[in-house]
């Protein structure tokens, strides 16, 4: 598991400043949607995935530490989670996402296997 869940792993091939919007997102067991937005902010990097009809239009926040590979030629982001894990993840909350550190703790805890800090 990634020690820093909110940072891109060095081996992912991430290039700071790259625009990932619209790229396909691939879980370990298949496609889950497209990147709706993303951030390269140090200590708080993430992608937001629009899952479309797969789980009824849900948006999910994936910490950058879940990214295993970026394929610029194919415009694909590969993550080290299954479709079921992502489907069960906390839904992206546009309101809490910006100013609520507890929300990042909850999401980070889910993806790192730690219980959320309350």
Image (cartoon, helix red, strand yellow):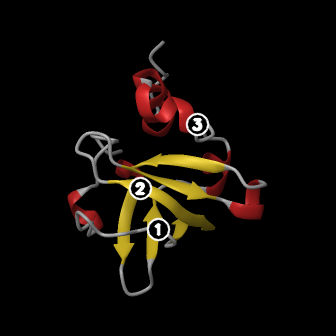
- Residue 21, placed above or below residue 51: below
Element under label 3? loop
Q: Which residue is disc 3 drawn over?
A: 93
Left or right: where 95 falls relative to 4: right
Q: Which residue is drawn at 46% across and 60% down?
A: 79
State the image coordinates of residue 19 (x, y, percent, origin top left): 36, 69
Residue 15 appears in the figure? yes
Residue 45 drawn at (x, y percent): 33, 47
Q: Do the residues labelled 3 and 2 touch (CB within 8 Å)?
A: no
Q: What is the CA distance from the residue labelled 1 to the residue labelled 2?
A: 7 Å
x, y percentage for residue 46?
Answer: 40, 49
Classify 16 as above or below 106: below
Q: Mark 1 packing: few (<14 Cα in 10 Å), some, or many (20+)?
A: some
Categorize mark 2 by other alpha carbons within 10 Å: few (<14), some (14-19), many (20+): some
Above or below residue 61? Residue 102 is: above
Q: Where is residue 114 in the image (x, y as percent from the top left)?
A: 44, 27
**Does dot 1 land on a helix, a strand or a loop?**
loop
**Lower sequence index among marks 1 and 2:** 1
44 lies left or right of 24: left
Residue drawn at the location 61% of the way across and 47% of the way down:
85
**Residue beneath disc 2:** 38
Residue for point 44% across, 79% down: 75
Q: Residue at x 71, y 62 (%)?
A: 52
* Residue 28 in sight in this render: no
Distance CA(mark 3)–CA(mark 2)? 14 Å
Q: Circle 1 sits on which residue? A: 21
Along the line of sight, the residue nearer the viewer: 38 or 84: 38
């Amino acid at each position: 598991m990634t020690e820093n869940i909110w940072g891109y792993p060095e081996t992912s091939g991430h290039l700071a400043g790259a625009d990932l919007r619209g790229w396909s997102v691939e879980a370990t067991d298949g496609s889950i949607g497209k990147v709706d937005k993303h951030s390269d902010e140090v200590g708080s990097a993430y992608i937001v995935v629009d899952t479309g009809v797969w789980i009824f239009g849900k948006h999910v926040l994936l910490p950058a530490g879940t990214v295993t590979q970026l394929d610029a030629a194919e415009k694909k982001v590969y993550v080290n989670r299954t479709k079921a894990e992502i489907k069960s993840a906390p839904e992206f909350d546009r309101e809490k996402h910006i100013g609520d550190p507890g929300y990042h703790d909850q999401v980070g805890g889910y993806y790192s296997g730690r219980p959320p800090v309350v």
